Image (cartoon, rainbow, N blue to C red):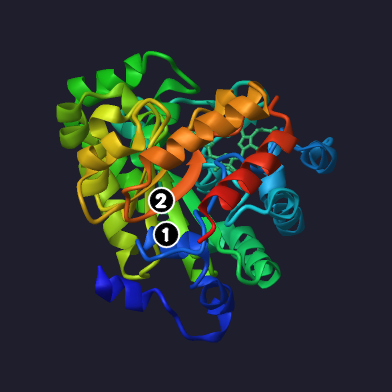
Amino acid sequence: MSERRDAGQPAGQQQTGRTAAYDSAFLRACRREPVPHTPVWFMRQAGRSLPEYRKVREGIPMLESCMRPELVTEITLQPVRRHGVDAAIFYSDIVVPLKAIGIDLDIKPGVGPVVAEPVRTRADLDRLRPLDASDVSYVTEAVGMLTAELGTTPLIGFAGAPFTLASYLIEGGPSRTYENTKAMMYGDPELWADLVDRLAGITAAFLDVQIAAGASAVQLFDSWAGALAPAEYRKYVMPASAKVFDAVAHHGVPRIHFGVGTGELLGLMGEAGADVVGVDWRVPLDEAARRVGPGRALQGNLDPAVLFAGHKAVELKAREVLDAASGLEGHVFNLGHGVMPNTNPDALTRLVEYVHGQTAR
Ligand code: CP3
């Protein structure tokens, strides 16, 4: 840990952003160091809850917007300007690296990623070639522009974890049951292992591009891992996610691991190689800390639906989160999942002010 911590303070020109952000509350909390206040950011803080987002996205398809560095920069900065959050999250999507290697897919509004030809057979795996930095030069460019603008505010890079990406590729789109995904996992474990191993390589390469360009931390989204029992997670998924974390460890930036409905998996998600474990709203943070064990910070975990209940209720529930987190070594305040599109952005701004005010030291 301490080796990584030192390695995390880089010297060198294109790493200006990371050096400037090194002492930020967010990165200090990730490293479990004392903080001036509890840092706050929100998953999906950039997006449809913001009128300024809807305006700049008008007429531009989601995936196309991810390939325009000026637009990516503007959209990433919008919630930082508006809410005063302690970190920016790079505006992109978990399926961008798959698109970049030539998979025919689109993001359908109100639905999510849809894959034209699902991956189901060994022959289909040939379509998953490794990702090269040159496939996503627009990401390198956007991260460079962003870190220059962000100054001391850290930029979080991110990617989809092998299981969650595999679920979109195999199902062909969002799923409630993951029946085709689990059919491959249980029915052809060798093919499954090959698939998630390839995805681990692509994911690691995508994170590597973002860190090399100046991202200060990375989050691995295994949003749908909660569909698995712990024994299955350990056997079929954890090795691939661990491979991703190992591959980026040498950069020395904090690695966050998040999923939804993962109460039973929190210990394993830490063991996979995370420095920070993201927790959804179903498990209080003090209990999550017992499950994760010492040596890792926690991120979370206000129910995003609370933001529809009025400010008094938001304060009450946010206070409960802070109380549950009071014994932790490192806490990054977040929602238990992403901001919902109909959320009133003012509720988010007031929540940031509330958490900062309550925790100022
Ligand atoms: O602010 C941020 O968090 C950064 C941007 C971000 C997006 N997607 C932009 C986006 C991040 C971190 C993601 C990750 C992502 N994408 C995940 C993991 C996070 C999670 O929610 O669990 C997943 C599962 C996806 C796949 C995906 N992309 C879904 C399910 C959707 C929603 C579809 C819909 O319309 O409801 C998307 C589209 C998407 N990605 C939007 C945004 C802002 C909305 C599309 C739009 O604005 O047109």
Quadrant containing ligand 1: top right
Q: Which of the two labelled residues, at mark 1 and mark 2, occupies the earlier sequence position?
A: 1
Residue 102 locus on image (x, y percent): 53, 44
User: Rounded to the nearest whole Å, what is the CA distance between mark 1 and mark 2?
Assistant: 6 Å
Q: Is residue 127 visible?
A: no
Disc 2 residue type (three-letter): His
Q: Which residue in the structure is indicated by mark 1? A: 29
Residue beneath the point at 56% across and 46% down? 355
Residue beneath the point at 54% across and 71% down? 21
Q: Quadrant of the N terminus?
A: bottom left
Q: Is residue 110 visible?
A: yes
Q: Is residue 17 above or below residue 223?
A: below
Q: Is residue 320 above or below residue 356?
A: above
Residue 181, quarter of the rendered image:
top left
Residue beneath the point at 42% across and 78% down? 9
Q: Is residue 345 above or below residue 232?
A: below
- Cβ at disc 1 under 8 Å from ligand 1: no
Q: Is residue 352 above or below residue 320?
A: below
- Cβ at disc 2 under 8 Å from ligand 1: no
Q: Residues within 10 Å of mark 1 (few under 14, many from 20)?
A: many
Disc 1 residue type (three-letter): Ala
Dot label at residue 331: 2
Q: Residues within 10 Å of mark 2 (few under 14, many from 20)?
A: many
Residue 6, quarter of the rendered image:
bottom left
Residue nearest the viewer, comparing 345 with 224: 345
Dot label at residue 152: none
SS at mark 1?
A: helix
Residue 114 locus on image (x, y percent): 55, 26
SS at mark 2?
A: strand
Report if the CB atoms under discs 1 and 2 are less than 8 Å apart: yes
